[in-house]
Amino acid sequence: MLIFFGFIAVIASVLGGFMLAGGSLGVLMQPAEVIIICGAAAGAFLASNNGKAVKATLKALPRLRKSGKYNKELFMELMGLLYLLLSKGRQEGMMSLEKDVEDPQQSALFARYPKLLADPVLMEFLTDYLRLMISGNMDAFEVESLMDHEIETFQHEADIPAHALSNVADGLPAFGIVAAVMGVINALGAPGLEASLLGPLIAHALVGTFLGILLAYGFVSPLATFMRHQISETDKMLQCIKVTLLANLNGYAPPIAVEFGRKTLYSTERPTFSELEEHMRSVRSQPASGG
């Protein structure tokens, strides 16, 4: 929701300041300028992206309404789930996790964490590497290299919508100038135009420059930045899973492996050692075997 409050602040500040300076909002109502700028930006967006990028961008836009999805509580749940899975694998053998991994929706372990179950990116990453660990003795170095490649691929694909919007933001001021120049050409090229009418037409033309810059830096560019923040949060969850599983592969006990994962988190979401220990204690107090 913060992004909408930010947009409201942008509109209120710009238009409010303009009106306080004695400006009239009617002057800014220039549909032709809007058509030129937005139409050109949309056309450039389509021309510079393939079908996959366009679909990915349109699919990513509704997710901008959600903020703070990966908070401290969810990180705690992730570390609790990792602890349960690794503890069961250590006590009963990794093969005991096969049913949980193959059908997480029917697993008693995964059922404790519906928010994690609802995240396909995290679940696919976690179950895929648990499946590899179940299949036999895995070389930690090779698994780490594979994880790095997958995370890099995720980052590249997830950044496509943000990159596309960033390019649109870069072009909007130029399209605003195009609209302004066309308005000036139209004003100066009008036959028999009186000097007293020239000023308003020039002012109307300059609205194009104003709109292009405002749309770029007040709306589209913040959307691209917000998308990158969301990617960063998801990436941190994957890094937490990666470090925890690798620590387990290297022979560390589940509590220590989860501590490795805790250290990867941002300070704003990272639980303290005591908080994590207390959470692990509460997790241990419940049945830990999955069906």
Image (cartoon, rainbow, N blue to C red):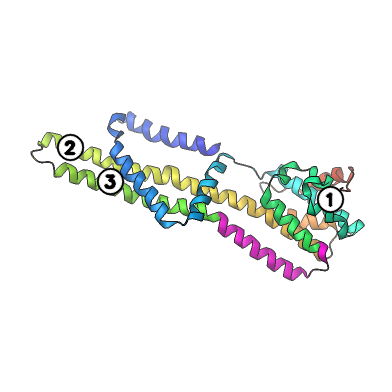
Give the image location of residue 237, x and y in percent.
Answer: 68, 52
Amino acid of disc 3: Ala
Q: CA distance from mark 2 to mark 3?
A: 17 Å
Give the numbered dot on residue 179: 3
Q: CA distance from mark 3 to mark 1?
A: 61 Å
In percent of the image, x 28 and y 49: which residue is there? 178
Dot 2: element: helix
CB contact under 8 Å: marks 3 and 1: no
Q: Residues within 10 Å of mark 2 (few under 14, many from 20)?
A: few
Give the image location of residue 55, x and y in percent.
Answer: 51, 50
Circle nearer the viewer, 2 or 3: 3
Q: Residues within 10 Å of mark 3 (few under 14, many from 20)?
A: many
In percent of the image, x 81 and y 44: which residue is there? 279
Magenta span: helix, strand or loop, mainly? helix
Precedes in sequence: disc 3 or disc 1: 1
CB contact under 8 Å: marks 1 and 2: no
What's drawn in magenta, residue-wise?
A: 134-158
In percent of the image, x 88 and y 58: which residue is there? 90
Q: Residues within 10 Å of mark 1 (few under 14, many from 20)?
A: many
In percent of the image, x 26 and y 42: which residue is there? 206
Give the image location of residue 259, x and y in percent.
Answer: 78, 55
Amino acid of disc 1: Leu
| Number of numbered discs overlaid on the protein picture | 3
Amino acid of disc 2: Gly
Dot 3: element: helix
- Give the residue number, with chain letter if any, for mark 2: 199
- Give the residue number, with chain letter if any, for mark 1: 84
The answer to which image quadrant residue 286 occupies is top right
Q: Is residue 280 above or below residue 48?
A: above
Give the image location of residue 223, x and y in percent.
Answer: 49, 45
